Amino acid sequence: MWNRQQNSRQVLAVFEEAIKNPSYRWFSFSFCCFWIWFWAVSRSSLLFPRSVADVASLFRLLPVLVGAVTFVALGLWFRRRPFLVGTKRGVYVSYIAMSIGCGICVLSTQGLLSLDLTVLCYIAGSVVMGVAAVFVQIEYARVLGVMGSQRALVQIVLSTLESVLIVALLGVAPPVLAEACVVVLPLLGLFAFLQARKALITAQVLKHGFDHELLLPWRLLVTLFSQGVAVEAFRFALASSYMSYGSLNAICTVASIVAIVVTSLFFRLNYNNLIYHVGFVAMASGFLLIACLPGYAALGAFLILTGSRYVNFLAWSLFAYFIKNKGLPATWVLAWPTAFLLLGMYTGGLISDTLARTGLPSHTPVLAMILSFALLVVALFMLSSRNLLTGWGMVHPGASDLASDSLAEVRQQLAEYYDLTNREGEILACIARGRNSAHIAEELGISYATVKTHLRNIYDKTGVHSKQELMSIIEHETLVLQGEHA
């Protein structure tokens, strides 16, 4: 069903704003530089020495593994004690370290060192790049959180489109020029990000969400892990399709951008439908085509890569939603989902490497059937009735971000409907902002035991048994209000 005309005009206005606003343009170019770096690390051989491939081909994904481990460490540390990430000095260090890491990896590809030194050089560069890229991604997530899910999705679309054009140029450029560009791009990304940061990031934004209860969207973690495993496990089969992997990747990225614009910005589809009914079904259909109709391997590869890019776009939009609408800190929001995605990619790399060594072509149909079945099972499991009430699955990125006065209206409606006292209404407002009981007690100047007593009364009046169920009621009423305002 098409969104109403007013919402369609709003979507077009967001695109116009992203193109005309200087801060948004700078951010889009900076994010574009990151996508190009990620392509160079995970999808090309620009930073990977061939001599190392003969020793251990899985070193190709070493920066991915380093990033996953770093994200896990940050998640564990942040859970125990929230810490500030994103100072101006830290931003400089992160981008410059990425550039240095790229330079070290490029040095390892030149054939100037012995095999042992080449391996050590590549490992050192991968570690530096992998760790630095983690903190760079946190900064991007923080800015997207300021924008909200809809503007974030538009920024992701525009930056990815820019990266496709630049990657296409690098593909026909001399290797030396392409390597030099990959080394310099993080520095260009730094300059562009600093221009955008002036208008979008404040001291309050850096500490955003520190007082919130840290919730973990484990269903999203499973989703991203399974996606990473499926696509990376089948990378060699995709590369052996009728067209070159580079050309196929560019075509699929553009197709996924078109799909995102149509389905998530102009159609009223929620994240559950977009991820599991569109993205995962596209990938599963691609695997089935390769397994059952080998003559259509190129079409199957197209569906797999397009579905994968599509889900990636939605994941970044969800990160923005968690930060802005759920009030969670950017470090926490990005740490666990991205760690699971990268771990899935590395696990898939292990599978593809094993199959390549044992004769991939004969195993291709079997692997395709297994991955297709696994993706469909994951989609069905994640679309259980319980998931429909978890909040993020029922939100649609095409909806405008609800203002705080609208959220206050929802709380007022609930307080009147369930006959809550003034104090119970205040506590309900705190819960809607993600506050835990200890913070509510401090904010309202009452004891922890008093908060618990009021919570029990709220649970009795609303007929729920936990904060999660109470949040589901608030989110449901918010969605109803969004529909009225659309």
Image: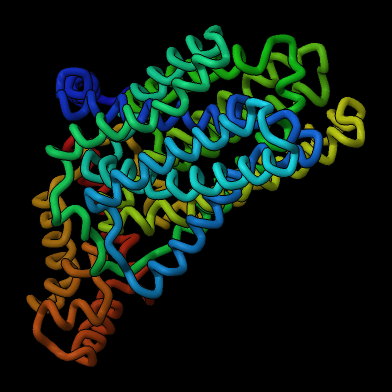
Q: Position of residue 162 (x, y in %)?
A: 38, 18
Between 59 and 426, which is closer to the camera in this rendering?
Answer: 59
Name the side, left or right, on which 237 lies relative to 317.
Answer: right
- Is the residue 274 above or below the residue 238 in the image? below
Q: Nearer the viewer, residue 164 or 461?
A: 164
Q: Quadrant of residue 81?
A: bottom left
In the drawing, does residue 194 fall left or right of residue 343?
left
Residue at 40% x, 33% y: name it.
269
At horizontal 21% and vertical 18% (from top left) the residue drawn is 19
- The answer to whether residue 154 of the structure is visible from this angle is no
Residue at position x 39%, y 75% from top?
Answer: 80
| Residue 332 visible somewhere in the drawing | yes
| Place of residue 150 in the rendered image (x, y in percent of width and height, measured from the top left) | 28, 34
Given residues 354 and 459, the one toward you in this image is 354
Quadrant of the image for the C terminus?
Answer: top left
Q: Residue at x 43, y 47 (%)?
A: 132
Task: Provide residue 218's location: percent of width, then percent of height.
Answer: 51, 59
Q: Is residue 323 above or below residue 482?
A: below
Q: Nearer the viewer, residue 353 or 252?
A: 353
Instruction: Provide residue 155's location: percent of width, then percent of height.
Output: 30, 28
Q: Which quarter of the image is occupied by the N terminus?
A: top left
What number of labels is visible? 0
Residue occupying the far top of the picture: 172
Colour scheme shown? rainbow
Quadrant hosting residue 78: bottom left
